[in-house]
Image: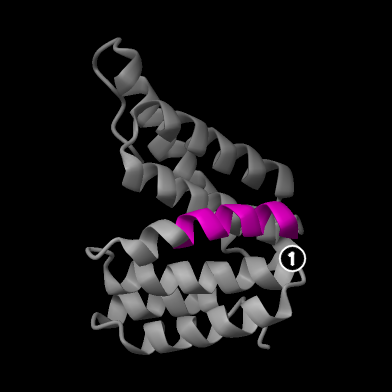
Amino acid sequence: MAKTPEDTKPESWHHFFAATANNQAWPLAEAPRSQIDALALLNAAHASAWHWQAVGNELNRKRALMLLAQAHTACGFGQSALLYANEMRTFFLAEPSTPDWELAFTHAIHANAAHAAGETTLHESSYALAKSAIAAIKDEEDRGIVTCLFEQVPRP
């Protein structure tokens, strides 16, 4: 859990609520579809994105889009999921400092959103890229985390 701010600056509280909502949303977004609390997931994901929009840097905002893409996919909103996924994917693929695990997440979430939106060709290509990116993750723990999410992505 994020540390509660000790001051009254709005920026401190935005950061606190952004991190708290993010940390609440990801476990919901990664839950099996039959166990998803859609309202709680969407509220937390959108709250996090809203607060990151107020105080976050570009990386925070793009990670918030990644969460929104996953949340909208999980709730069956394929078109909006793909819009979020396309934007965050453009950022992470263009950023040379994107870590291997985040690149794999990017492809996996994009594949999932493309499937939810009914974009078969896009789903197939992103799925293949995710599979390759996961295999290239150096850290075993990071690979395991990404693999758990990737296992929820329907196979082409």
State the residue position of label 1: 117
In the displayed structure image, the side of residue 41 where residue 57 appears, left or right: left
Quadrant for the N terminus in the image: top left
Q: Amino acid at mark 1?
A: Ala
Quadrant for the C terminus in the image: bottom right
Q: Residue at x 71, y 61 (%)?
A: 35
Q: Residue at x 64, y 65 (%)?
A: 113
Label 1 sits on a secondary structure element that is loop
10 Å neighbourhood of mark 1: few (<14), some, or many (≥20)?
many
Q: Residue at x 36, y 89 (%)?
A: 135
The spot of residue 24 in percent (x, y) is 50, 45
Q: Residue furthest top?
A: 8
Q: Quadrant of residue 7?
A: top left
Q: Residue at x 64, y 78 (%)?
A: 123
Q: Is residue 52 visible?
A: yes
In the displayed structure image, the side of residue 127 where residue 138 appears, left or right: left
- The residues colored magenta run 78-89
Q: Main secondary structure of the magenta part?
A: helix
Identify which residue, 144 or 68, lies in the foreground: 68
The spot of residue 115 in percent (x, y) is 70, 73
Q: Is residue 10 above or below residue 84?
A: above
The spot of residue 141 in percent (x, y) is 30, 77
Identify which residue, 39 or 68, lies in the foreground: 68
Q: Is residue 84 magenta?
A: yes
Identify which residue, 37 or 43, lies in the foreground: 43
In the displayed structure image, the side of residue 4 where residue 116 appears, left or right: right
Q: Is residue 30 above or below residue 87?
A: below
The spot of residue 23 in percent (x, y) is 44, 47
